[in-house]
Amino acid sequence: MYKQQISRGLHVSLDDVDFPLTHAFQNTPVTRDRGGGHPVVLFSPGYGSMRELGTALVEDLASRGYVVVTMDHTHEAQIVEFPSGRLVLQRTPAEPNDAAIARASRVRRDDTRFVLDELAALNAGKNPDAEHCRLPHGLPGSLDLSRTGMFGHSLGGSTAAETMARDRRILAGADLDGSVGRVVAATGLDRPFLLMANADHGRDNDPSWAKFWSHLRGRRYQLRLLGSGHHTFTDLAPLAQQLIRALPVPPKVVAELTDRVGTIGADRAIAVQRAYLGAFFDLHLRHRDGRLLSRPSPRYPEIEFVP
């Protein structure tokens, strides 16, 4: 069904297209961290989107030793597939107004806090799986929930900030190119937070970011990824660029996709995001400072530090 939606969006047939393989495997045993439990990072996608579109960033954090928990927000995501194979489709407006966004934000906060509760139960040896699926060997007891962070794209980034404002279990958060909710923008946070923007987004044209920034009382960072668009921060960027090269996508659709994913090469954009997101969580969840966040780096000239 997801493939059919992409096919309609590109106006081309994907019958002969195989989507890329990832580096993830199901039900693999958990290796214990030498320093104790693994730090935990939560991920929330953008409005109407699905957690799978964060795979490029999520699997990199997992490779660094984080347990990454991705969330689909049921009835808002385009498609949610449960372990049994049951599919639940989107019921919220595809083009939401402010009231719909506010409702979605409340549900997302509740979703996130529920997940935190269930992770605590899992770590204590319980199996919170609603369909009683067997957990990967070694997972219970392997989490260090005292070192929990969260990041998200678009509304998912706002979800990270809003949940942090109400739940101190999240120690550090990152927002990838999402405007911030009105309440948390006014109250701010007292813990570390990273704002990463596309080439045309920032405090100068997003009042929510300007207000939020002025009320952040912990370590704060604003970075701009040059050449990027709003969906550069999702797997849409590599998928779109590969499909445009391989298929006869109409020029109008190519222009629309380029506006969404920017002009920066997807492979390079992913490498840059992985470096800075990893550095942020390494610093604030593991106290490992590689100095990448302290000043511009010649290794990543695409990143602009916004003071």
Image (spheres, rainbow, N blue to C red):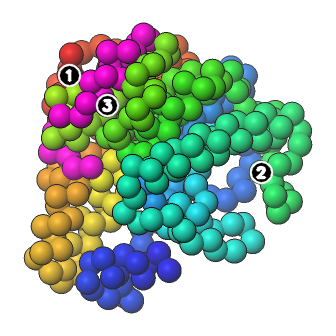
Question: Height in image: 203 above or below 230?
Answer: above
Tag 1: amino acid: Val
Q: Name the residue under label 3.
A: 208
Q: In screen coordinates, is 265 left or right of 283?
A: left
Quarter location, residue 202: top left
Tag 3: amino acid: Ser
Asked if the magenta segment contains residue 31, the reply would be: no
The residue lying at 16 percent from left, 70 percent from top is 254
- State the residue lying farthest toward the top: 217
The residue lying at 26 percent from left, 45 percent from top is 269
Q: Position of residue 24 (x, y in %)?
A: 56, 56
Q: What secondary structure is found at the residue carrying circle 2?
A: loop
Find the magenta span and give its range.
205-230
Residue 255 visible in the shown view:
yes
The residue lying at 72 percent from left, 66 percent from top is 83
Q: Disc 1 versus disc 2: distance between alpha carbons?
A: 42 Å
Q: Position of residue 193 (x, y in %)?
A: 42, 23
Quarter location, residue 260: bottom left
Q: In screen coordinates, is 239 left or right of 21?
A: left
Q: Disc 2 versus disc 3: distance between alpha carbons?
A: 41 Å
Query: Sequence order check: which comes first, mark 1 or mark 3?
Result: 3
Q: What secondary structure is found at the residue carrying circle 3?
A: helix
Query: Sequence order check: which comes first, mark 1 or mark 2?
Result: 2
Q: Do the residues labelled 1 and 3 touch (CB within 8 Å)?
A: no
The residue lying at 45 percent from left, 26 percent from top is 184
